[in-house]
Image: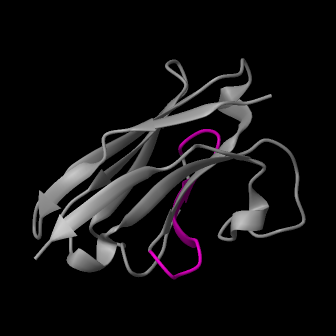
Amino acid sequence: QVQLVESGGGLVQAGGSLRLSCVASGRTFRRYFMGWFRQAPGKEREFVATINWTAGSTYYADSVKGRFTISRDNAKNTVDLQMNSLKPDDTAVYYCAARTRVLAIAITRAGGYDYWGQGIQVTVSS
């Protein structure tokens, strides 16, 4: 069983920055693919970013590329999402997700992850 707990959300003005953090339980955290997703009211959950086990490979949604950075610290069991140049369209509940086993679903899809955090609100005012 893996538990994921997000922190760092809140309210920020457009153009500002926030850093989300996710702490994971589990002794084999370093083997997990980790991702961030978000869900705005009335919309489906969408992919934001993902990072592989060694942090040597990252992938971003086009909508956040160049503004967001995903990183991880396997010694601390954490994965962070640094969000810069925030826009009102970034307003959503953000979820941390872990892919702990091989799944026949792409890492950019919500179904490609088997554990989820409870979500944290990020609101960007114009």
Residue 103 shown left or right of residue 54 in the figure:
right
Q: Position of residue 9 (x, y in %)?
A: 31, 47
Vertical side of 95 occupied by 13: above or below: below
Residue 95 shown left or right of residue 10 in the figure:
right
Which part of the image, by quadrant, shows the C terminus? bottom left
Which part of the image, by quadrant, shows the N terminus? top right
Res. 25 visible in picture? yes
Q: Position of residue 18 (x, y in %)?
A: 22, 50
**Residue under the point 32% across and 61% down:** 68
User: Is residue 47 within the magenta segment?
Assistant: yes
User: Is residue 57 within the magenta segment?
Assistant: no
**Residue under the point 27% across and 67% down:** 67
Magenta part mainly helix, strand or loop? loop
**Where is residue 118, by image quadrant?**
top right
Residue 105 shown left or right of residue 42 in the figure:
right
**Residue under the point 69% across and 66% down:** 110
Vertical side of 103 occupied by 72: above or below: above
Q: Which residues are magenta?
A: 41-55
